[in-house]
Image (spheres, helix red, strand yellow):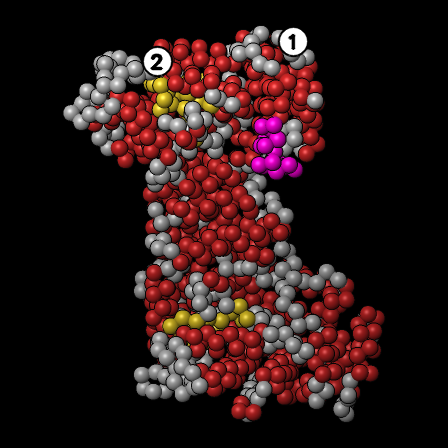
């Protein structure tokens, strides 16, 4: 009786005995001797997978208990001998039954200890080669029936060459492994001999899809192999198949170090005498360099650092592949030495880890005792892995936590108890880890640990779901979404003309970007916003260089995108603004009210006076840069709401002044000055602001409501060589002003201008004499135009014309009015606005109790009582109008304060909706709106 069978002579643990007792009655049993009966119980006790296979294929029971047969290398017969008469269903069934039968034989040989672990790995790999080739032959024939065959230059059928990667390529495939494949074909052309002709690329894509389906699809009989195609050029975003030429172009131009590392294990699974040699010659220079390859050292250092960091973070003590001292670390030791030395030492160019280990010893790169220990410990872990996966045909490398599977492992590996098994395994992993730590040092300047996670996410081809757990500041779904954004960006970059320098900079920037996201607890949305900026600059390396050489700039970019979607879009639209992020101390410093004009004047001094296009561009860039500073100070709380509007207003006024000066200068050069004016005289011209600019309540996206007036009393022609009517001079100048504001340049529009509040609206002249303006307001203007006048003020003009405007405004607003008529007209206009924007509007501006209602309240108070209280119309902003109303006794102090608070809150929400969603709750807004509705009802009911 063998030693293994003797184990069964002792009483099985009750749990395992119960499992055996459940399965035995379900089997169709052949005649078995006593030793075979004990062996059968051992197999059933250890592996539910073997139990299922014996139930499904009872003819295998005798094979699985024939130790003499099991000890021999596995023989591989074609599971699809008659391709012509096979349907898809029969093909799928035959492949899966063959796979299960042969895996069962390999596992039984391992459990019964009649075959070495190394031979088992070779058998599994040979089985995979056989099944993949059988499926390939069937798929090729099936696709060729409809589409014909691609032919090579000799008129022979052209093959699809299948590269097996990883453990499959190395001939050391584990029991329940994915298989990593890459598909390639010799050259482009068209098929012939089928019902229809297609390009070779299309034929081989269809063939690849059918082959994957034959192996990967889960049926009632299970699957053959899970197929992973992500190691192909461009990963998931790339074509399924590539020609030799396209593959060579990719690896020469874009191949990365990790792809070289992966290609060490590449093996053609279906070699032919002609094309396989060509493919190997094509790939070899990419993988192996003729000199000692120190260029790969930095990449390998990062890879090692990542492995170490991952082990510390996740503490995978029970994972025999990914834990410290696991299978992955042996592979790293061997493949690192191959990658660095293999170009000069051809003996190291081995896909098999066992042959590579032997070559490392023979070339004196490993001492004999190191070689022996590494090989022995590696084989032990592979043996444990094989049984672990063979328990239930599951792809796992984590030692079981449940007692039943632990008992199976102890029994299958020949230990007395679980502690002995784990002690042996831990000792092996400890020895491996020591080799791993020694194989390559971290250099003088190891990459900061916080960068390693970002590099993993950028370089890895693992699914987002597998990487998500590394992003521990995010929930799982959010982490997956973030990684998918990153993967999509990477795929977009691969399709665009991002040169080698651009790719190099991105490889540096992305890890730092993810580190900043982690520090700021940034979500997937924040990354999406930052990548929106990156998409605009990815082909312009100057901007990538700027962010790469100035880490604080990238830090500020993440912070601004975190705080505001509007700012993210703004930066993406105008990447020139990235310069503003270089110095954070300057970024959040906004100028004083008078500084805007000085700064703009300095900017314009550098522009030639005859270059209108550049003048317009500089104006826009100045506005965007200053608006960015204001927004940055806003979202960080440096500027309160009222001050934000003040600064946006100061900025607009500075730009209006500059545009008027430029337009005047250009008009004067072309037509001369208006009649009677000398160069030192005032321009007799003014810009009147209405609406938000007039009320000092400008927002980020606000347009400018402007009216243009002049005091030109002379109808004589201008004083230049080319003359026009002097009043026509002002009209043409306003046309030029509007043109300078609204023309779209590469930097966008300066401001949208609305001139419809001028006398007679769109039917009126763009520039009118101020006396005409006064007559219109006095005799023709509607009540709503007087309401608009409440929020008006002069923003450009000399003292004389300013005094005249203030006189007109005071006279119009101070007119006595019939309160009943005024109430009716104000409420009628409000109702028209409601109908226009929707009776049930929920916008804070137009909703019942919203901003417009409150503005109408202050305008009504001015028009109704301005004749009695001049202070009501002294200012044009709502807050100070309400103060004046309280001082006049028109509103109670508590009412005034409640209205002012409500107004600021509602404006704050409206304002925030531009930068980012408002934080106020619906309940808070409703309270504010109710305060407005109460005063409205008091005044108008």
Question: Separation of disc 2 and disc 1 at Cα?
Answer: 36 Å
Picture quarter with the C terminus: top right
Q: Residue 708's x, y, as percent? A: 38, 23
Residue at point 49% right, 44% down? 529
- SS assignment at label 1: loop
> Which span is picked out in magenta?
828-845
Q: Is residue 658 above or below residue 566?
A: above
Q: Earlier in the sequence, mark 2 or mark 1?
A: 2
Instruction: Give the residue displayed 25% in from the left and 26% down from the top.
Output: 667
Q: Is residue 269 above or below residue 496?
A: below
Which of 3/53 is in front? 53
Examine the rendered structure and indicate whether residue 542 appears above or below residue 919.
below
Q: Which residue is mark 1?
A: 889
On-image quarter of the N terminus: bottom right
Is 26 or 845 nearer to us in this picture?
845
What residue is drawn where x is 35% and y is 19%?
769
Can you give x and y, in whole percent of width and height, for residue 77 in the image? 56, 88
Name the residue tied to disc 2. Answer: 798
Please check the rendered image and state whether residue 844 is part of the magenta-colored stretch, yes or no: yes
Residue 685 placement, left or right of 76: left
- Residue 651 lies in the magenta stretch: no
In percent of the image, x 36 and y 27: which residue is there? 766
């Amino acid at each position: 009786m063998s030693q293994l069978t003797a184990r069964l002579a002792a009483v099985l643990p009750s749990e395992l005995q119960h499992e055996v007792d459940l399965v035995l009655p379900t089997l169709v049993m052949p005649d078995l001797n006593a030793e075979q009966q004990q062996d059968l119980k051992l197999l059933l006790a250890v592996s539910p997978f073997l139990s299922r296979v014996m139930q499904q294929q009872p003819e295998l029971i005798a094979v699985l208990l024939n130790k003499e047969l099991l000890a021999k290398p596995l023989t591989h017969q074609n599971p699809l001998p008659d391709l012509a008469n096979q349907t898809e269903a029969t093909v799928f069934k035959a492949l899966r039954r063959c796979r299960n039968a042969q895996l069962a034989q390999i596992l039984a040989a391992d459990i019964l200890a009649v075959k070495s672990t190394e031979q088992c790995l070779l058998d599994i790999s040979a089985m995979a080669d056989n099944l993949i080739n059988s499926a390939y032959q069937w798929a090729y024939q099936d696709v060729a029936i409809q589409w014909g065959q691609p032919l090579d230059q000799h008129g022979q059928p052209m093959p699809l060459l299948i590269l097996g990667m990883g453990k499959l390529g190395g001939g050391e495939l584990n029991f329940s492994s994915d298989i990593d494949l890459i598909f390639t074909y010799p050259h482009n052309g068209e098929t012939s001999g089928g019902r229809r002709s297609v390009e070779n690329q299309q034929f081989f894509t269809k063939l690849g899809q059918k082959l994957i389906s034959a192996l990967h699809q889960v049926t009632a009989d299970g699957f053959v192999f899970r197929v992973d195609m992500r190691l192909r050029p461009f990963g998931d975003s790339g074509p399924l198949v590539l020609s030799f030429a396209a593959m060579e172009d990719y690896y020469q131009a874009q191949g990365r170090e990790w792809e070289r590392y992966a290609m060490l294990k590449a093996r053609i699974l279906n070699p032919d005498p002609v094309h396989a040699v060509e493919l190997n010659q094509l790939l070899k220079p990419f993988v192996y360099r003729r000199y000692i390859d120190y260029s790969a050292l930095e990449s390998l250092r990062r890879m090692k650092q990542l492995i170490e960091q991952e082990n510390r973070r996740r503490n995978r003590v029970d994972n025999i592949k990914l834990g410290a001292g696991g299978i992955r670390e042996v592979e790293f030791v061997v493949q690192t030495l191959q990658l660095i030395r293999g170009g000069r030492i051809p003996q190291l160019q081995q896909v098999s880890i066992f042959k590579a280990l032997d070559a490392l010893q023979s070339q004196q790169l490993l001492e004999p005792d190191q070689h022996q220990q590494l090989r022995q410990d590696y084989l032990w872990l592979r043996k444990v892995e094989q049984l672990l996966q063979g328990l239930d045909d599951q792809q796992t490398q984590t030692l079981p936590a449940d007692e039943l599977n632990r008992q199976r492992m102890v029994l299958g590996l020949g230990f007395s108890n679980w502690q002995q098994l784990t002690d042996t395994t831990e000792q092996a992993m400890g020895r491996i880890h020591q080799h791993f730590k020694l194989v390559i040092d971290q250099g003088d300047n190891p990459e900061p640990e916080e960068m390693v996670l970002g590099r993993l996410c950028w370089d890895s081809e693992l699914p987002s779901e597998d990487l998500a757990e590394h992003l521990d500041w995010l929930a799982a779904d959010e982490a997956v979404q973030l990684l998918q954004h990153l993967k999509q960006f990477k795929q977009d970059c691969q399709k665009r003309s991002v040169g080698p320098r651009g790719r190099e900079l991105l490889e540096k920037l992305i890890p730092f970007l993810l580190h900043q996201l982690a520090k700021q607890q940034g979500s997937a949305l924040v990354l999406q916003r930052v990548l929106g900026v990156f998409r605009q600059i990815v082909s312009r390396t100057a901007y990538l260089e700027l962010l790469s050489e100035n880490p604080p700039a990238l830090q500020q970019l993440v912070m601004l995108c975190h705080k505001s979607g509007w700012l993210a879009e703004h930066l993406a639209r105008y990447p020139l603004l990235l310069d503003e992020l270089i110095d954070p101390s300057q970024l959040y410093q906004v100028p004083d009210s008078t500084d805007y004009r000085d700064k703009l004047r300095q900017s314009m001094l550098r522009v030639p006076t005859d270059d209108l296009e550049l003048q317009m561009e500089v104006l826009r860039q100045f506005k965007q840069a200053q608006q960015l500073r204001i927004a940055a100070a806003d979202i960080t709380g440096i500027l309160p709401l009222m001050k934000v509007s003040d600064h946006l207003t100061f900025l607009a006024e500075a730009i209006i002044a500059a545009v008027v000066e430029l337009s005047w200068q250009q008009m004067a050069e072309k037509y001369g000055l208006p009649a009677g004016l000398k160069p030192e005289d005032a321009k007799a011209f003014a810009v009147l602001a209405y609406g938000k600019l007039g009320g000092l309540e400008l927002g980020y996206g606000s347009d400018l409501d402007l009216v243009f007036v002049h005091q030109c009393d002379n109808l004589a022609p201008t004083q230049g060589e080319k003359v026009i009517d002097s009043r026509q001079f002002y009209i043409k100048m306003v046309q030029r002003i509007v043109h300078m504001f609204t023309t779209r340049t590469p930097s966008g529009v300066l401001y949208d201008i609305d001139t419809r509040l001028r006398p007679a609206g769109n039917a009126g002249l763009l520039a009118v004499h101020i006396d005409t303006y006064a007559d219109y307001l006095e005799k023709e203007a509607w009540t709503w135009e007087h309401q608009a006048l409440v929020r008006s003020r002069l923003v450009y003009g000399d003292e004389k014309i300013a005094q005249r405007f203030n006189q007109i405004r005071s006279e119009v607003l101070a007119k006595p009015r019939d309160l009943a008529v005024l109430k009716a007209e104000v409420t009628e206009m409000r109702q028209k606005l409601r109908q226009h924007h929707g009776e049930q509007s929920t916008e804070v501006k137009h909703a019942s109790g919203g901003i417009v209602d409150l503005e109408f309240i202050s305008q009504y108070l001015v028009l109704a009582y301005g004749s009695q209280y001049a202070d009501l119309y002294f200012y044009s902003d709502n807050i100070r109008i309400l103060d004046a109303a309280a001082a006049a006794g028109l509103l109670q102090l508590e009412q005034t304060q409640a209205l002012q608070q409500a107004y600021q809150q509602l404006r704050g929400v409206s304002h925030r909706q531009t930068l980012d969603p408002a934080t106020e709750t619906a309940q808070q807004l409703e309270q504010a709106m109710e305060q407005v509705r109460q005063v409205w009802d008091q005044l108008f009911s």
